[in-house]
Amino acid sequence: QVRLVESGGGLVQPGGSLRLSCAASGIDFSIYKMGWYRQAPGKQRELVANIPPDGTTNYAHSLKDRFTISRDNAKRTVYLQMNSLNPDDTAVYYCNAYFWGLESTYDYWGQGTQVTVSS
């Protein structure tokens, strides 16, 4: 059974930082592209960042200066360090695991963790 379990969300003041974690089980973590998405109320889910197996990183353009994605294959965990948070970052943040092969595509999501930026 595949599980992606996010943690680290919560309430933070503007200008603050949070680090999200996503622990994966039931997949060969090292071959998956791992990503973070977010969905704010009334808005579509959007990509925050992803990190393929080779460790390169991709960010939403508006977030690349404040957010950092990383992965630890030994711990089967992907992280999202978020700095200089502002109220526009308030959203549910979802972890994603994606693998594409010659014959199959696998796409898994976590349950999400709420991040609220407010004074």
Image (cartoon, rainbow, N blue to C red):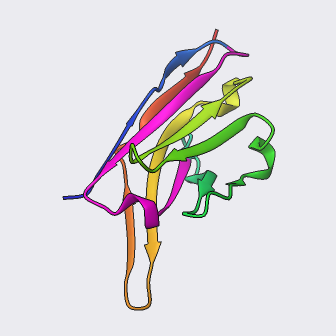
The magenta stretch is: 14-37
Q: Position of residue 46 (x, y in %)?
A: 61, 53
Q: Is residue 3 left or right of residue 19?
A: left
Residue at image location 36% in from the left, 48% down from the top? 110
| Residue with the most extreme top position | 119
Which image quarter: residue 54? bottom right
The residue lying at 62 percent from left, 32 percent from top is 81
Q: Name the residue at 74% across, 23% down.
A: 84
Tell me how many marks there are: 0
Quick one: quadrant of the C terminus?
A: top right
Question: Where is residue 19 shown, x and y percent of the image?
Answer: 55, 28
* x, y percent for residue 12: 58, 15
Q: Quadrant of the N terminus?
A: bottom left
Outermost residue to the bottom = 103
Q: Is residue 28 found left or right of 30 in the rendered image?
A: left
Q: Is residue 45 left or right of residue 1?
A: right
Q: Is residue 45 above or below residue 112?
A: below
Quadrant for residue 8, please give it.
top left
Judge whether residue 21 is colored magenta: yes
Decide: is 119 above or below 53: above
Instruction: Check if residue 78 falls in the magenta segment.
Output: no
Where residue 87 sits, quadrant-wise, is top right
Q: Residue furthest front?
A: 74
What residue do we see at 46% from left, 64% from top?
32
Foreground residue, 96 or 40? 96
